[in-house]
């Protein structure tokens, strides 16, 4: 999940940004990923919250999130212990 500065949430039920060209490429339902959120143009200024949500299925569930922000690439991992649990991964500020 990606929460944009205008509080629009890009995820499986809302795969496109309202204010820009951001989009989710597809909803992975088998749990093996990847799911990617891309922007075709310059990313608008503001704070972007990246989250992982455990929709349903086997728990606990491990995840790895890779964030490419400009020239920087960072990976985050964790475990979701119950269905509907959400982990906040990182907030990125775009100036």
Image (cartoon, rainbow, N blue to C red):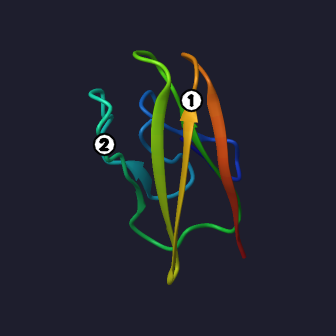
Residue 14 lies, in percent from the top left, at 46, 33
Q: Looking at the image, is mark 1 or mark 2 earlier in the sequence?
A: 2
47 left or right, relative to 82: right
42 left or right, relative to 8: left
Front residue of 14/84: it is 84
Whether residue 69 is visible, yes or no, is yes
SS of the residue under disc 1: strand
What number is the disc on residue 80?
Answer: 1
* Residue at horizontal 51 percent and vertical 26 percent from the top: 54
Nearer the observer: mark 1 or 2; the answer is 1
Residue 2 lies, in percent from the top left, at 57, 46
What number is the disc on residue 62?
Answer: none
Q: Quadrant of the C terminus?
A: bottom right
Front residue of 87/15: it is 87
SS of the residue under disc 2: loop
* Residue identifier under label 2: 33
Whether residue 48 is visible, yes or no, is no
Do the CB atoms of the residues marked 1 and 2 lie less than 8 Å apart? no
* Residue at horizontal 30 percent and vertical 34 percent from the top: 28
Q: How many marks?
A: 2
* Residue at horizontal 67 percent and vertical 55 percent from the top: 90
Front residue of 32/55: it is 32
* Residue at horizontal 32 percent and vertical 31 percent from the top: 31
Residue 36 lies, in percent from the top left, at 37, 52
Residue 58 lies, in percent from the top left, at 41, 17
């Amino acid at each position: 999940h990606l929460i944009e500065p205008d509080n629009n949430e890009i995820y499986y039920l809302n795969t496109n940004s309202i204010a820009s060209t951001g989009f989710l490429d597809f909803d992975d339902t088998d749990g093996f990923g990847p799911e990617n959120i891309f922007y075709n143009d310059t990313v608008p200024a503001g704070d972007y919250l990246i989250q992982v949500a455990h929709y349903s299925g086997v728990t606990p569930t491990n995840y790895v999130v890779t964030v490419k922000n400009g020239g920087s690439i960072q990976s985050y991992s964790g475990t979701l212990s119950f269905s509907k649990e959400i982990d906040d991964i990182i907030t990125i500020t775009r100036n």
